[in-house]
Image (tube, rainbow, N blue to C red):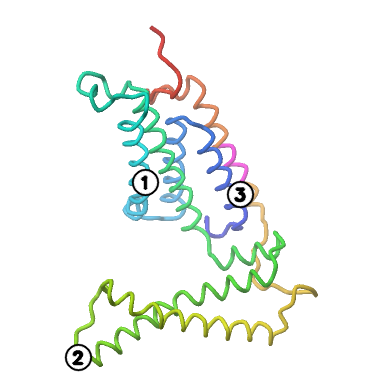
Amino acid sequence: MLKALNPLSKLLVCIVGLVASVLVFDARFQVVLIVVTGFTLVALNRTSPLLLLALMVPFCLFGLGFLTTSLLFRQDSDFATRMAGEALLSSHAFSAGLTLFLRAVACGMISVFFALTTDPAALVRALMVHARLPPRIGYSLFAAMLLVPDLASEAQQMRIARAMKTGRRIRRVPGPAEIMSLVIPMLAFAIRRAGRTALALEARGLSPVGPRTVLNAPSFRRSDAIFIIAALSVIALCGAAAFSDIGGVLSLPLVGHEEPA
């Protein structure tokens, strides 16, 4: 269902979600954004929850750096010496670090949502048709998409050839020395491939002017309008709830606000 939408519709919603996640410095907003995005992926895209958890690990580690920095290295916080006698959850340092941690995870979840539901080729075609992306850039992106898998295949063939020549078993994961020895051959392969691609594009009359037909270009449908309205409404409601008593059920402290005595 989500993959059938126009990539530009999802791109617009994801950009708005990222901007809202950065501007709304509230832990409750980030939690709701993470839950809604994850539930949408699991329910509508049939994404495995284990896959989502695995993809969130790098963003959690990144956010953990924000959390520990806020707790241990704030100039106005002596957390390292007071944490035994102070309630951790009520400190402003923990509140700020937790919000930054959740912000990193929310941005990661939105990015994963776009990556798992969008075909890269369809995105390039949509940009060429609806966003006036120059054909030279569009077809260069197509060539890069085809080059990356060929680079991996070429590297594997080189490793197999070297293993047969030396009589050693090929390692499943190449070591640092083997990786360094593959840099120059792979660079030469990429340069040759880029030259052939440029000649092929010129031979087919690729020019910045003149009419051009793009096959299988995604079009905007009624489902795209429904998706944009529904997604932006959810983001707006989450932002409104972050500053109202509705979001108080999570009992997470707001940064920069002191509780009344």
Mark 2 Cα shell of 10 Å, populated few (<14), some (14-19), many (≥20): few
Left or right relative to 25: residue 62: left
**Mark positioned earlier in the residue sequence (3 or 1):** 3
Label 3: which residue? 12
**Mark positioned earlier in the residue sequence (2 or 1):** 1
In magenta, the rendered stretch is 228-234
Give the vertical position of 109 relative to 79 (above or below): below
Residue 25 x/y as whole percent: 48, 31
* Identity, as a three-letter code, of the amino acid under mark 3: Leu
- Tell me whether the residue at label 2 lies in contact with that at label 3, contact meaning CB atoms closer than 8 angstroms: no
- Between 4 and 186, the one lying in front of the other is 186
Give the vertical position of 174 relative to 26 (above or below): below
Q: Which is more foreground, mark 3 or mark 1?
A: 1
Label 1: which residue? 62
* Identity, as a three-letter code, of the amino acid under mark 1: Phe
The residue at 34%/42% (across/down) is 65
Label 2: which residue? 167
The residue at 38%/25% (across/down) is 252
* In magenta stretch: residue 162: no
